Structure formats: C-alpha cells, structure tokens
Image (cartoon, grey):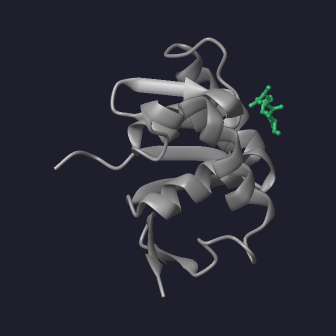
C-alpha cells in the first residue's frame, strides 16, 4: 500500500481549498497538513527549510507524493488532477479549470455538493452521502 500524499497549506480555505477538494472528491485518503498558530515554528522554521531542498520554489500550498514535491497552486492542481485521474487527456485543457472552479466556487450547486469529508486520525477521507 502506498503512503497517502500530504497536502500542506494554511488552516484556511484560500489557495489550498481546491487542492483539498480534488483529494476529497477522489476519495483518496491524504494527510491534511494545516498550519495555523504554529505557522512560524512548523512552516517557516521546520517544514519550509526541509522542503526547499526538494523543491526550491516551495510555498503553500504544496503536495508531497512519495519522492515528488509539487508546489505553486496551479501546479498542485494540475498534478492532482492528473494523479487522481480527474483530468482526462481528451478534455484536459477544456475541463481542468472548470472542474476546480465548480468544486471551489459553487459547492451548493455543483454535482459534488453531497460530498462530505471526515477526518480520521491525521488523514482525511471523504464520502458521498
Ligand atoms: N504563487 C503562489 C503563491 C503562494 C503564496 O503566496 N502562499 C501564501 C499563502 S496564499 C503563503 O503563506 N506562503 C508561505 C510562504 O511564503 O512561505 C501559488 O500560487 O501557490
């Protein structure tokens, strides 16, 4: 079994929300590394210096998937869309941004509105209800 990937961002929606939503929509468990009052110690003093060695552009949001570290929100969305097989080659450019926007901006009216996320220990899993 492969280790779930880690999505790192602030404990707010912001640029991390569509990234988290892609993971939730896919049903893949993932570690939700959400920085809050510990930002200075956990992000700036610990994780950022460690991750910059693996990706010199490291910022929030980022995704760690095994040996791969992807950062910059658009790149994270492209990576997750491809990894989770949400973005299909046939309609990659036509659908990618629209899919994220639907998840991000219109949860109430989107076909995914019944998606719920549950936190299990340190990983997140999602289910449609
Ligand atoms: N161009 C970047 C902007 C990233 C960014 O500005 N991240 C903010 C939060 S929205 C942050 O707190 N970065 C942490 C840092 O500078 O180390 C992206 O699209 O991901």
x and y percent of residue 5 in the render? Answer: 41, 45
Q: How many marks?
A: 0
Residue 62, relative to residue 15: is it above or below? Answer: above
Residue sticking out furthest to the bottom? 129
- In the image, 104: left or right of 42? right
**In this view, 75 is above or below 80:** above
Let me know if residue 10 appears in the view. Answer: no
What's the residue at 48%, 26% (across, down)?
Answer: 69
Of residues 82 and 90, which is closer to you in this image? Answer: 90
Would you identify the image quadrant in which residue 95 lies?
A: top right
In the picture as drawn, the residue positioned furthest to the left comes out as 1
**Where residue 115 sits: x, y (%)?**
55, 76
Name the residue at 81% across, 51% down: 14
- Residue 66: x %, y % from top left: 33, 32
Does residue 103 appear anywhere in the picture? yes
The answer to whether 38 is drawn above or below residue 42 in the figure is below
What residue is at 70 percent from the left and 36 percent from the top? 60
The image shows residue 56 at horizontal and vertical percentages of: 61, 11
Kindly indicate the quadrant of the structure image that contains residue 29: bottom left
Q: Note whether 29 is above or below 116 in the view shown.
A: above
Tell which quarter ligand 1 is in. Answer: top right
């Amino acid at each position: 079994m492969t280790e779930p990937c880690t999505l790192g961002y602030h404990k707010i929606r912001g640029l991390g929300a569509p990234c988290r939503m892609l993971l939730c929509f896919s049903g893949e468990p993932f570690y939700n590394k959400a920085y809050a009052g510990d930002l200075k110690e956990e992000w700036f003093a610990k994780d950022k210096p460690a991750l910059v060695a693996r990706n010199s552009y490291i910022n929030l949001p980022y995704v760690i998937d095994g040996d791969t570290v992807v950062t910059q929100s658009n790149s994270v969305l492209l990576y997750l869309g491809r990894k989770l097989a949400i973005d299909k080659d046939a309609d990659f450019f036509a659908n990618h941004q629209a899919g994220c926007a639907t998840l991000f901006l219109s949860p109430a009216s989107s076909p995914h509105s019944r998606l719920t996320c549950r936190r299990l220990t340190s990983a997140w899993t999602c289910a449609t209800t």
